[in-house]
Image (spheres, rainbow, N blue to C red):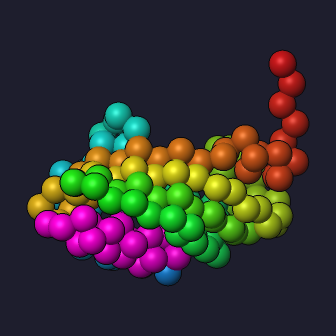
């Protein structure tokens, strides 16, 4: 597959699953055996359900996307309203925005590995969580 084809796959899952909440589309984009997420095998449904439950109105914008070989790097901004539990934090109703970087590896037209980093500290601060050392 070309780098442009791989970018299309990543844009597709981000729009269809994360933005539209179409969890039924997971098999269209992810390997049926699951994916390696930040080095640990996980079912894509778990990850999508976690984010969609916490922020059901989430909207992800791809700010930049670069592809080379079988990897796609996306710089994203995500916005949503905290309407479900997030790492044990009860819903606050607060609107939050955060940035992140996603590196996805594609094999056989499916995502097989993901490395995603999000500004989770920024999310916690916006939710009013106070961390002390």
Location of residue 124 in the rendering, given as x and y in whole percent from the top left corner: 76, 45
The quadrant in which the N terminus is found is: bottom left
The kind of secondary structure the magenta stretch mainly shows is helix
- Asked if the magenta segment contains residue 43, the reply would be no
Q: Position of residue 9 (x, y in %)?
A: 29, 71
Which quadrant does the C terminus fall into? top right
- Name the outermost residue toward the top: 133
Q: Relative to 65, say whether 23 is above or below.
A: below
Q: Is residue 64 visible?
A: yes
For residue 92, side relative to residue 5 (left or right): right
Q: Residue at x 39, y 60 (%)?
A: 66
| Nearer to us in this view, 3 or 123 | 3
Residue under the image location 41 percent in, 44 percent down:
115
Q: Name above or below for residue 85 compared with residue 120.
A: below
Which of the 4 quarters of the picture holds residue 121?
Answer: top right
Residue in the image at 36% along x and 48% along y: 114
The reply, left or right, for residue 3 in relation to residue 120 is left
Pinpoint residue 41: horizontal percent, then vertical percent.
30, 40
Closer-to-camera residue (114/88) = 114
Q: Is residue 103 left or right of residue 28?
A: right
Residue 3 in picture, x, y percent from top left: 24, 65
Instruction: Report how many numbered discs are placed on residues in the image.
Output: 0
Left-right relation of 20 to 77: left
Which residue is rendered at x = 53% and y = 69% of the image?
A: 62
Find out whether residue 16 is within the magenta segment: yes
Is residue 49 something one can see in this rendering?
A: no
Find the magenta span and give its range. Answer: 1-19
């Amino acid at each position: 597959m070309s780098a442009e084809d791989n970018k299309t796959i990543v844009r597709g899952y981000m729009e269809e699953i994360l933005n539209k909440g179409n969890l039924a589309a997971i098999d269209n984009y992810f390997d049926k055996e699951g994916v390696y997420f930040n080095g640990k095998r996980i079912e894509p449904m778990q990850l999508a359900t976690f984010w969609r439950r916490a922020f059901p109105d989430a909207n992800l914008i791809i700010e930049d996307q670069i592809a080379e070989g079988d990897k796609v790097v996306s710089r994203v901004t995500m916005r949503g309203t905290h309407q479900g539990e997030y790492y044990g934090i009860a819903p606050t109703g607060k609107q939050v925005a955060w940035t992140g970087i996603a590196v996805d590896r594609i094999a056989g037209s499916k995502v097989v590995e993901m490395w995603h980093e999000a500004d989770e500290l920024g999310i916690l601060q916006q939710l009013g969580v106070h961390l002390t050392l």
